[in-house]
Amino acid sequence: MLLSSASALDTIPLTSHVRNIVSTYFRYVTLSHRWGRFEPLLRDIEGRVVYKLAPTNGLLKLQSFCLTSCQHGYLWAWSDTCCIDKESSAEVQEAIGSMFSWYKQSALTMVHLADISNTGALGSSVWFKRGWTLQELLAPDNMLFFRQDWSLYKDGISNHKQNDTMH
C-alpha cells in the first residue's frame, strides 16, 4: 500500500506521505496502572497468543488492555509488566530511565483504575498514590481513564487530559 500510493508523488510530498503512513501504522498505546498480584511477565507471554492464555487477574487486565487498544484503532500496545525483561538488570535500568519518553511518545495512555467502579470518584483511586503517577500523568498528550471493568470513566470524551470536566 505504501509503495503503490507513494509512487505517484514527488520527493517532498513523498517524504511527508511516508512519514504520515508510518506514524499512523506504528502508533502505540501505553498502559498506566497499579501493579497487582500475578502480573504477566515477558517470559509468561513471549511467543504466545495473549488471548489463548488462561485469564488470571493480571493477564485479564493485559487482555482487556489489548482489546480496548484495538477497539480504539491502535495496532500496538505497551505494558511495562510484560514489555520489559525484568531478569535483565541492564534492561530494567534502561527502561526506568526511558519511561517518561515511552509515555510521551505514545499516541494514547490508557489509565486503568482497578479500584474504581461506576460510582467511584477518580481522585480516590490508589493509582494517584503510586511513585510513577506524576510522570505518567504529565508525559502523554492524550489520556483516557478506565474503570475496573474497562468502561470509559466519562463516556463521550476523547481525551480526558484536555477535558474541563476532569480538572
Image: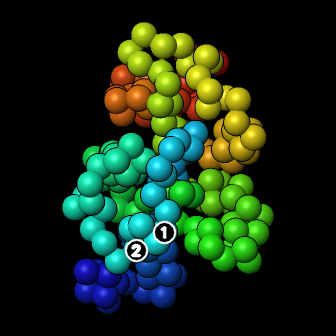
Q: Amino acid at mark 2?
A: Glu
Q: Quadrant of residue 7?
A: bottom left
In the image, 81 versus 111, the foreground residue is 81
State which quadrant residue 14 falls in: bottom left
Q: Residues within 10 Å of mark 2 (few under 14, many from 20)?
A: few
Percent from the top left, x then y, of residue 93? 76, 69
User: Where does the N terminus fall, quadrant-wise?
Assistant: bottom left
Q: Secondary structure at mark 2?
A: loop
SS of the residue under disc 1: helix
- Which residue shows up at 34% across the image and 47% down it? 56
Front residue of 144 and 147? 147
Q: Is residue 114 above or below residue 86?
A: above
Instruction: Residue at 56% x, 58% y: name it.
Output: 80
Please tell me which residue lies in front, 11 or 31.
31
Can residue 59 be seen here? The reply is yes
Residue 55 vs 53, above or below: the answer is above
Q: Is residue 138 visible?
A: no
- Badge 2 is on which residue? 46
Q: How many marks?
A: 2
How far apart are labels 1 and 2 at the CA level? Answer: 6 Å
Q: Quadrant of residue 98?
A: bottom right
Which residue does the image show at 59% across and 23% down from the upper left? 125
Residue type at mark 1: give it: Leu
Task: Name which residue lies at 42% across and 10% down.
Answer: 119
Q: Which residue is mark 1?
A: 42
Labelled pair 1, 2 in contact (Cβ < 8 Å): yes
Q: Residue 74: horizontal and vertical position, in percent?
A: 36, 56
